[in-house]
Image (cartoon, rainbow, N blue to C red):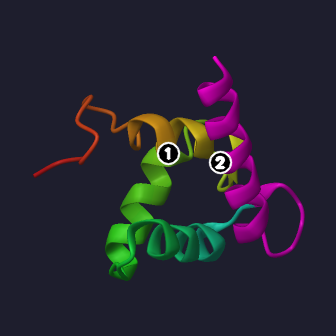
Amino acid sequence: MAGEADASAEVRAAFGRFDTDDDWLLDMHEFGRALARLTGRDRSAQEVERLFRVTDVDGDGLVSLPEFEECVRHGPAAPDGDPHGPA
């Protein structure tokens, strides 16, 4: 259980670093930077947008901490159940 709490604290800390305007929400630009930092590679604007849309589960145009945590733990939730989206 302590490992899970440590992982959650790490995810929250990472989210806070990527949230450059300190509103505890990631816009698409912040999300793209987070992806690049977390994965170690740049992604195309289309790929960032696709991943952003499937991570933004409530569709409000922003990624909240719970949405980000879910994405980090399990990958973005694609509508068809495939975390990688359509082929």
Q: Residue furthest right?
A: 22
Q: Residue at x 51, y 74 (%)?
A: 37
Q: Residue furthest top?
A: 1
Q: Position of residue 80 (x, y in %)?
A: 25, 31
Q: Residue at x 43, y 46 (%)?
A: 54
User: Mark 1 sits on what residue?
Assistant: 72
| Marks 1 and 2, how far apart at CA | 8 Å
Q: Is residue 20 magenta?
A: yes
Q: Is residue 60 magenta?
A: no
Residue in front for this viewpoint, 27 or 66: 66
In the depicted structure, whether residue 35 falls above or below residue 58: below
Magenta segment, principal secondary structure?
A: helix
Residue 5 picture quarter: top right
Q: Residues within 10 Å of mark 1 (few under 14, many from 20)?
A: some
Q: Can you tell which mark lies on residue 11?
A: 2
- Dot 1 amino acid type: Val
In the depicted structure, whether residue 2 falls above or below residue 31: above
Q: Which residues are magenta?
A: 1-25
Q: Position of residue 72 (x, y in %)?
A: 49, 45
Secondary structure under badge 1? helix
In the image, taking residue 52 as reference, residue 27 lies left or right, namely: right
In the image, taking residue 72 as reference, residue 45 lies left or right, namely: left
In the image, taking residue 41 as reference, residue 60 lies left or right, namely: right
Residue in front for this viewpoint, 75 or 5: 5
Q: Position of residue 87 (x, y in %)?
A: 10, 52
